[in-house]
Amino acid sequence: MSTMVSRLLISPFTVSYYTYQCFNSAGWIGVVSIFGYFVVGTFINKILIGPIVSLLVEQEKLEGDFRFKHMQIRVNAESAAFYRAGKVEHMRTDQRLKNLLHTQRNLMNKELWLYIGVNTFDYLGSILSYIVIAIPIFAGVYDGLTPGELSALVSKNAFVCIYLINCFTQLIDLSTTLSDVAGYTHRIGELRDVMADITKKQCEQEQYDPLSKEAVHFDSDLEIHSIPADTAFVLDRLSYKSPVSEELLVKDLTLKISQGMNLLVVGNTGTGKTSLLRVLNCLWEPCSGSVEMTTCFGPRGVLFLPQKPYLTDGTLREQVIYPLKDIYPASGPIDDERILKYLELAGLSNLLTRTGGLDTKVDWNWYDVLSPGEMQRLCFARLFYLQPKYAVLDEATSALTEEAEGQLYNACKQLGMTLISLGHRNSLKKYHDVMLRLCGDGQWELEKLKEA
């Protein structure tokens, strides 16, 4: 843009001045010829630029896909190694590279014709300047001039015409830069549209009145009664499906989840358990009905523990307090004693020795050093530290024994958390009050669990 702006600002003045000089020297024939030449050149360049913009957009997309594939292999290198999938990943990465190179080759071929058009326009412009001068000379307009005067006139007219053509040539030369700017602008425009849409949805989700909400309780017949209480989620005739499928996972689910009502969600694979959490977390849009969240995300609110533990980079302290450092800088001083207490409660006392302290920078990847069970324990230590009112656990103990699972669930209840769990183990029932069973084909049922 900086290259283009400097020329575009100066061009109107230089074109106006030399158009006037050209008219005085070569008459209307010279001006019309040069302007006509510029119009034809612009039209040809417009035709040549068209396919370049779309190819540049495609090339940027494929380049992003190629880089993402490298990142994917780097993150999942160990899993791929266990599968002995090196050749497969090499082949698939090669294919992405070939697609990228094929598109780049097509782009270079199209740009070649654009460069040929631009340079041809430049060279023919100098010939045109002498043709413009030759017309009045051979028409006899300057027959009365001496050879010396005619030579001076030709030099003057040539200078004026060539400079005017050069002004237009500089504008035509911007075609190559313009094609790049158009391609990048299109990609950035798509990104901004998506981000604006996400921001709009987030604003809509945050507009609610938590004081007007009610809670859910179950009687002996498992009917839902609405009474004033501290409520986390209100689901009203909720239906949802996967974004890549038209088949409803759950249909007309009506439920209110209040503090103290521990909910267990069960069902076969593919019935929509994790999908329900995505809808509750506003990651997926429901097909019909509504989901209202009356408690905010984060510490003292609602916290989600996904099935695959997420570990950030940084020290052990930053792992435990995440995301307080980045999102909630005004949450108060960090209590070392609390961190150590909750690491011990999660069964990770030895981790302090392995890292060398809470604030010691480590030069290894947490995913490479910790076992799946240790990663899940570390996420529970984070949960204990943040102490939300509601903990949503998506098979968060799948890599742990039932004994370790019981210790962590009991610790959550002792800290006053209301649990919303997804899982397959029967051992989870004793930590919950109500069970929501997803039966598939949109069907669901509620069951009150007996106290352990």
Image: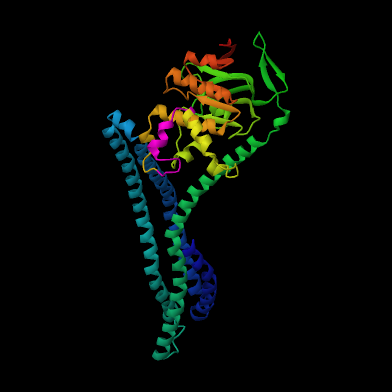
Specify whether residue 24 is in view.
Answer: yes
Q: Quadrant of residue 294?
A: top right
Choose between 381 and 286: the one closer to the eye: 381
96 is higher (above) or lower (below) than 421:
below
Specify whether residue 194 is in view.
Answer: no
210 is higher (above) or lower (below) than 218:
below
Count of marks, rendered view: 0
Identify the image's colour scheme: rainbow, by chain, secondary structure or one colour. Answer: rainbow
403 is higher (above) or lower (below) than 154:
above
Q: Which residues are magenta?
A: 345-361
Picture residue at 43% right of the left edge, 79% below the top: 159
Picture residue at 29% right of the left edge, 29% below the top: 82
Picture residue at 44% right of the left edge, 27% below the top: 347
| Residue 259 falls within the magenta-colored stretch | no
| Residue 348 falls within the magenta-colored stretch | yes
Q: Name the outermost residue toward the front.
A: 337
Picture residue at 43% right of the left edge, 64% below the top: 173
